[in-house]
């Protein structure tokens, strides 16, 4: 039986955080094989203004985070999007069958462009098309993502179906998969907003490079509510609900079990407990990231070799799409 092909990505915006790990990277590592493709989305990262030096640092930190979080020991293909030019070429073909209305409905664009208004880049608007190209280029069966990516994956599916309908069978239609817990880790300071690398403040974001003291401090200062004892109410007490869900995800147990375990605990003790769970999770990853920063040769070699493996598949799929749309060889 042919193995399941998996593609997923992470923006090249810096060291991954706890949400990236629990919502995405951990399951990438669990499912990793030579049929899994994990992409550092560095072209997506330039849709908002970025200093070249910061982009380069963010790209490296993302790669180091992915490998250190477990992908290094697997045969997964880990590569940077910009190194495989087929991504932008397929995005152009798909852009020609995408409507403005579809892009205007994307909630991520609405949220990100709100403060920028007319100055928002065209790239920010067409971003979901490039993301569809990223996925379809690898004949992916599954796309494991966090909850925030639902709408984008739906667009990728729609475009695949539309292309196949108009130009003949070309793309595999992928499905999104979500982790049972940890699909949406919230910011510890703003528990109604998702934890994000691009958050204005890092106080509520736990990075995979944070030291033990920083992690403990972030949990101790996490925003809660006026109660004193742990109880689960996702809408009324989002801060505590988020920490219960984090604990459940780290322990890989159902949320119901964590609710039972921690109900009635005083807030101080509970926050320290969740911090300890996270500290144990992050410590080895942080150690390996530091080694990569110190000597990057192994990282460079791995990404170089994997980019060739990615190009091998991507070039075949792009050729098929060009052929079917009428842009094959003369
Ligand atoms: N808070 C989260 N909880 C669970 N999963 C998450 N993911 C992202 N945030 C959470 C999942 O991680 C993968 C990579 O996503 P990303 O690179 O878009 O992460 P980010 O932190 O959202 O990055 P940015 O740069 O800060 O982007 P924006 O500005 O878009 O928020 C994905 O599978 C994602 O679902």
Image: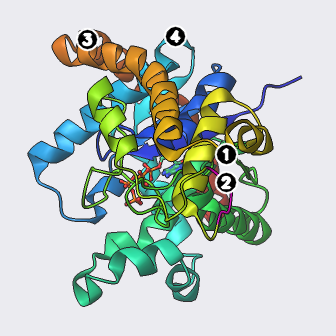
Secondary element at image label 2: loop
Residue 1 or residue 53, whichever sits in front:
53
- Residue under the image location 60 percent in, 40 percent down: 7
Q: Is residue 265 visible?
A: yes
> x, y percentage for residue 168?
78, 62
Circle 4 or circle 3, nearest the eye? 3
* Among numbered discs 1 and 4, the one appearing first in the sequence: 4
Residue placed at 71% from the left, 62% from the top?
157
Q: Residue at x 47, y 71 (%)?
A: 108
State which region is magenta: 230-234
Question: Gap between marks 2 and 4, in whole Å?
Answer: 39 Å
Q: Quick one: quadrant of the N terminus? A: top right
Q: Secondary structure at mark 1?
A: loop
Residue at screen point 25% across, 82% down: 116
Q: Measured from the top left, where is residue 282 in percent x and y?
A: 42, 24
Marked residue nearer the N-terminal end (2 or 1):
2
Q: Residues within 10 Å of mark 4 (few under 14, many from 20)?
A: few
Q: CA distance from mark 1 to mark 4?
A: 41 Å
- The residue indicated by pointer 4 is 73
Q: Which label's residue is closer to the chain start, 2 or 4?
A: 4
Q: CA distance from mark 1 to mark 3?
A: 41 Å
Q: Nearer the viewer, mark 3 or mark 2?
A: 2
Q: Along the polypeptide, which appears first: circle 3 or circle 2? A: 2
Which residue is denoted by mark 2 in the rendering? 231
> Badge 1 is on which residue?
264
Instruction: Kindly report the distance in space between the C-alpha atoms of the residues bearing marks 3 and 2.
Output: 41 Å
Q: Residue furthest right?
A: 1
């Amino acid at each position: 039986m042919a193995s399941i092909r998996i593609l997923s990505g992470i923006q090249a915006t810096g060291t991954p955080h706890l949400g990236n790990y629990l919502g995405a990277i951990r399951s990438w590592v669990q499912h990793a094989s030579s049929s899994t493709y994990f992409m550092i989305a560095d072209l997506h990262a330039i849709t908002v203004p970025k200093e070249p030096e910061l982009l380069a640092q963010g790209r490296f930190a993302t790669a180091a985070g992915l490998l250190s979080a477990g992908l290094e020991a697997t045969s997964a293909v880990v590569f940077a999007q910009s190194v495989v030019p087929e991504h932008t070429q397929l995005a152009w073909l798909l852009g020609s069958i995408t409507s403005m209305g579809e892009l205007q409905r994307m909630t991520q664009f609405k949220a990100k462009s709100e403060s920028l208004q007319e100055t928002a880049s065209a790239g920010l608007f067409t971003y979901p098309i490039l993301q569809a190209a990223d996925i379809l280029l690898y004949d992916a069966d599954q796309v494991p993502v966090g909850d925030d990516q639902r709408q984008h994956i739906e667009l990728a599916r729609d475009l695949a179906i539309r292309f196949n309908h108009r130009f003949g069978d070309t793309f595999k239609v992928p499905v999104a998969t979500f982790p049972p817990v940890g699909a949406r880790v919230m910011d510890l300071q703003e528990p109604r907003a998702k934890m994000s690398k691009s958050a204005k403040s890092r106080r509520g974001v736990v990075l995979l490079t944070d030291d033990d003291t920083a992690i403990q401090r972030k949990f101790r200062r996490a925003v809660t509510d006026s109660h004193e004892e742990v109880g689960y109410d996702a809408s009324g007490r989002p801060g505590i609900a988020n920490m219960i869900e984090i604990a459940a995800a780290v322990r890989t147990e159902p949320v119901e079990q964590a609710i039972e375990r921690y109900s009635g605990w005083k807030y101080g003790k509970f926050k320290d407990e969740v911090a300890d769970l996270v500290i144990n999770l992050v410590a080895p990853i942080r150690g390996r990231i530091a080694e990569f920063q110190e000597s990057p040769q192994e990282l460079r070699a791995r990404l170089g070799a994997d980019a060739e493996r990615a190009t091998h598949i991507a070039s075949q799929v792009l050729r098929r799409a060009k052929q079917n749309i009428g842009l094959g060889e003369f």
